[in-house]
Image: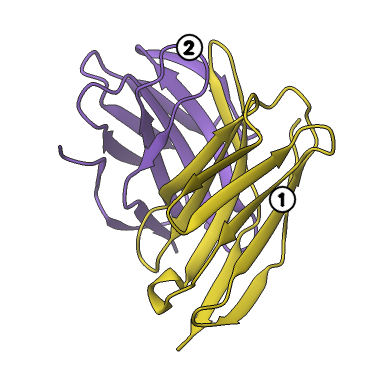
Amino acid sequence: GENVEQHPSTLSVQEGDSAVIKCTYSDSASNYFPWYKQELGKGPQLIIDIRSNVGEKKDQRIAVTLNKTAKHFSLHITETQPEDSAVYFCAASLSGGYQKVTFGTGTKLQVIP
Amino acid sequence: KAGVTQTPRYLIKTRGQQVTLSCSPISGHRSVSWYQQTPGQGLQFLFEYFSETQRNKGNFPGRFSGRQFSNSRSEMNVSTLELGDSALYLCASSFRVEGAGEQYFGPGTRLTVT
């Protein structure tokens, strides 16, 4: 089955700096890669996603890149703010007549004011 | 538009009992997936329901089951509870037809088994 590895497990940055989280996946058939932000006591919130036919996608301060050949994708957050502090999960999805999502182990991001 | 709702939010059960959790998806969403989240194992896929049919299942024992109703609401049942079933159970809904779709998660049900 699919396996998703995520690094680092914890990340501390100064407010205003950039943060990068990296993930690798094992199944070349995976075709959808969402990123989620989870705050304490809440369910994961979809923040950005990318499909396998796209190499990069940006939404304001957040961007995701995908390298299908190397089977890795990354989340980039620029100009970090204290409210960006949360746990971030990457995921890879196999789909067709079904959707099965495999999550990474999560990165706890702390933005220091 | 209302988000995904899950009931109850918190539940305490005793080992050996059974439990039913409920999930109401976003209006118009036909796909509902369930996940178990624990500190040790992270987020693990349980199963996906689409148009009242289970489309895929994760690597969980048969004690974990679910169903989806014609209004897309879904229930998950765990029988013969074990201490290791203590976790946050999350459901996510999606508008997908074929292929992957954006999933929107509910706040989860925190199950504690004593």
Q: Which chain is purple?
A: B
At mark 1, the secondary structure is strand
Task: Give coordinates of residue B4: x percent, y percent.
Answer: 26, 40
Q: Residue at x 43, y 75 (%)?
A: A81
Q: Residue at x 24, y 50 (%)?
A: B8
Outermost residue, bottom direction?
Answer: A113
- Label count reads 2
Q: Which residue is mark 2?
A: B98
Q: Quadrant of residue B68?
A: top left
Task: Give coordinates of residue A22: x percent, y percent.
Answer: 71, 55
In this orientation, which residue lies closer to the viewer: A14 or B95? A14
Task: Give coordinates of residue B97: x percent, y percent.
Answer: 41, 12
The 10 Å Cα crowd at callout 1, few under 14, some 14 to 19, many 20 or more, is many
Side (left or right) of A26 relative to B85? right
Kind of residue sitting beneath label 2? Glu
The 10 Å Cα crowd at callout 2, few under 14, some 14 to 19, many 20 or more, is few
Side (left or right) of A104 relative to A98? right
* Residue B82 seen by the camera: no
Q: CA distance from mark 1 to mark 2?
A: 25 Å
Side (left or right) of B65 relative to B67? right
Q: Which chain is yellow?
A: A
Compared with residue A85, is residue A68 higher up or lower down, i.e. above or below? above
Q: Quadrant of the N terminus of chain B?
A: top left
Compared with residue A28, is residue B40 higher up or lower down, i.e. above or below? below
Q: Which residue is mark 1?
A: A23
Outermost residue, left direction?
Answer: B1
Chain letter belonging to callout 1: A
Q: Quadrant of residue A3?
A: top right
Q: Residue at x 45, y 64 (%)?
A: B114
Outermost residue, right direction?
Answer: A70
